[in-house]
Image: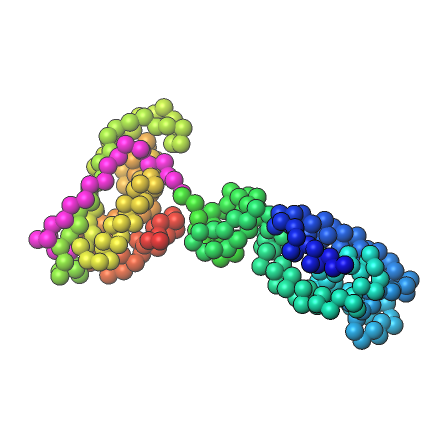
Amino acid sequence: MCYDCLLTSHVPANAISLARKALKSLLKDTEKELKKSYKQHQLSGFVAYTDKNSDHTGETHSRSTYGRSLPTFSGRGMILGSSSGGASSSHGSSRDHRREETEDDRENQCPICLGEIQNIKTLEKCQHSFCEDCITRALQVKKACPMCGRFYGQLVGNQPENGRMLVSKDSGLLLPGYEKYGTIIIQYVFPPGIQGTEHPNPGVRYPGTTRVAYLPDCPEGNKVLALFRKAFDQRLTFTIGTSMTTGRPNVITWNDIHHKTNCTGGPQLFGYPDPTYLLRVQEELRAKGITSD
Ligand SMILES: [Zn+2]
Ligand SMILES: [Zn+2]
């Protein structure tokens, strides 16, 4: 009777997974037994699997044989071998089955716990897969894929919730360096309020504020505008703290996503021309997890 066929064709998938687990633990036990019996030179049915050269004279050599050959054992092969000594020779297809399962195991291996994936969870952007428990714990520590580092998670800031971002366009206003295009004008408006538990001084008042920023109305500028919108919606554009320019505490301040608050004057005056600004600000946005995908 063939246990391989019994397991793969007549038992439902979840039962196979349970059976696999049982067989894997059995494999561990059997491995221990195997090592014992190897030492005592009492191998019988296993020799066919472990070593084709069958030249294990010294202790060292036997050990290295284990290292190479054990991973290619399948749980099913082991149970056949251990339950009936000569099963391996009468089971012609066992080698193919073993190869299949080895590839299978690699695909089903969780990169975090290195075990077989339990409750598979696949990250949507990079398609890397893990056990649900493993990836949940990993994402709590760092909001990125442990395999490729891709950013996951919606970083939410503490920008006051009742602000507004208003956008208008002026085709007659030309920014130095982008004279072929008009200008996108962004207005941020915040009413005064009281700091919440997510702010440095809960219960303390902060004044309202308005800010204006400019982007060229070119394709790259509109890309940055969409990212600014995302950042604002995730409450990342502003925070509450001490003003860098006035030293005044408990005010709404910029939060490391630089905006051009002047049309002209160059970088020193937070204006244009500044040929690398659109690239730099996209890096700043990326650092906060704001990307176009
Ligand atoms: Zn895992
Ligand atoms: Zn990934």
Q: Nearer the viewer, residue 68 or 193?
A: 68
Q: Which residues are magenta?
A: 155-175
Q: Is residue 25 left or right of residue 235?
A: right
Q: Is residue 76 left or right of residue 189?
A: right
Q: Is residue 79 left or right of residue 157?
A: right
- Name the spot of residue 67 as percent of width and height, x first: 75, 65
Please identify the quarter of the rendering in which residue 197 is found.
top left
- Viewport quadrant of the N terminus: bottom right
Q: Is residue 264 visible?
A: no
Residue at the farthest top position: 203
Residue at 23% x, 53% y: name it. Answer: 222
Please identify the quarter of the rendering in which residue 158 is found.
top left
Residue at the farthest left position: 172
- Residue 285 in the image: above or below residue 102: above
- Name the spot of residue 35 as percent of width and height, x first: 83, 59
- Residue 192 in the image: above or below residue 86: above
